[in-house]
Image: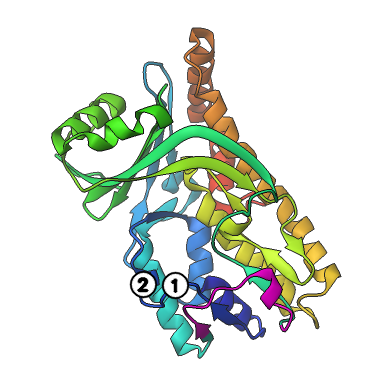
Amino acid sequence: MALALALKLHGTTAEVFEARDRLAVRNDARVLALSEGARQILEWLGVWSALAATPIETIHISQRGGFGRSLLRAADLDLKALGWVLPAGDLISALDHALRAANVVYHDNSRVDRSSTAAFALTAFAEGAVEPGTGTVRDYGQHAVLCSVSIAGPHRNVAWERFTSEGPVALLPLGDHYAVVFTCADDSVDAVMSLDDEGFLALLQQRFGTRHRFTATSPRTTYPLGLRYRPNPVGERQVWLGNAAQTLHPVAGQGFNLALRDIWELARASGVAADPGAPEVLAAYARGRQADRRGAIGFTNLLLDSFASGFAPLKHARGAGLLALDLLPPLRAFVAKRMIYGARAWP
């Protein structure tokens, strides 16, 4: 949906083919953490004003059982927010409304594969997953447990990334509660999902610590975590982006933000080309996206690998790194801009 709007804004006609029913697409229970850079892209697409998103003004990064923590603040970068949190269904509805207003042709219940795309100048596979056998795979041996929780006080628009030996725990402010991404090992996910609400809240409290008191939880869902990465995101009059090009671990919330930057660059490249599917156009797009894609993957892998070990000297080194990040404004600004704008750090 976002790609079709972006292409239209650049003067390129596009049609959407969706395998599911058009109304069913809106029933997406996920919560999205959008960077400020992603917000700017959605504003350019004309959909941001229709969304009620919760701002992230501060990101608190820490490790359980070790010293050191770092705070990233929007005010330090003269921004209103570092990021924004909203239900995925709300964004989908806003994009769908914009597509209808722009008279973009939309085919629902229409599955497309490579053999049925010959009639188009360019086919973009913008959803789904990286096809087996076409890229790099890393199994993290973890599942994400998703839910929302109520707390005993205000969240003050602070997001938390808490690293533990069992995996990271993220709290994202959404309305007056928190959306939770709770990571656990594959062999413990069934036990976590079988807990009653009281038991899960106790486990979350133990993993997160005492800076918030959790009082209630929504029903939980879960999905496995892994890296799926297509090294070359283009083919003959074909391009893959979003989850069809790379599926990332949710730590640091890079996946959908990277997808929106894919869209921005593809629409820009196609909009100035006489033939948007020409080999040289797609090759230039792939080269231009290489640093950002590799950077996002390397950043998430570095975070996971750095905080995975319970080895005491390494834990102290991580604490020193968090402390250095907190004490060195230029380094802190670099990390924040990398999370907000990607490898190019463009506002």
Q: Mark 1 points at which residue?
A: 20
Look at the picture and state if 229 lies above or below 242. Answer: above
Whether tag 1 and tag 2 are in contact, CB under 8 A, the answer is: yes
Q: How crowded is mark 1: few (under 14 residues within 10 Å), some or many (20 or more)?
A: few
Asked whether residue 114 is drawn in magenta, I would say yes
Residue extending furthest toward the top: 312
Residue extending furthest toward the bottom: 103
Q: Residue 210 carries which label?
A: none
Asked whether residue 41 is drawn in magenta, I would say no
Q: Can you give x and y, in whole percent of width and height, for residue 99 in the image?
A: 48, 83
Dot 2 falls on a residue whose secondary structure is helix
Look at the picture and state if 81 lies above or below 299. Answer: below
The answer, for residue 261, to whether it is visible in the render is yes
Left or right, 236 with respect to 211, comes to right
* Magenta residues, start to end: 106-119
Q: Residues within 10 Å of mark 2 (few under 14, many from 20)?
A: few
Q: In which quarter of the image is residue 314?
A: top right
Residue extending furthest toward the front: 115
Left or right, 290 with respect to 304, comes to right
Q: Mark 2 points at which residue?
A: 24
Number of labels in the image equals 2
Q: Can you give x and y, in whole percent of width and height, for residue 135 in the image?
A: 69, 47
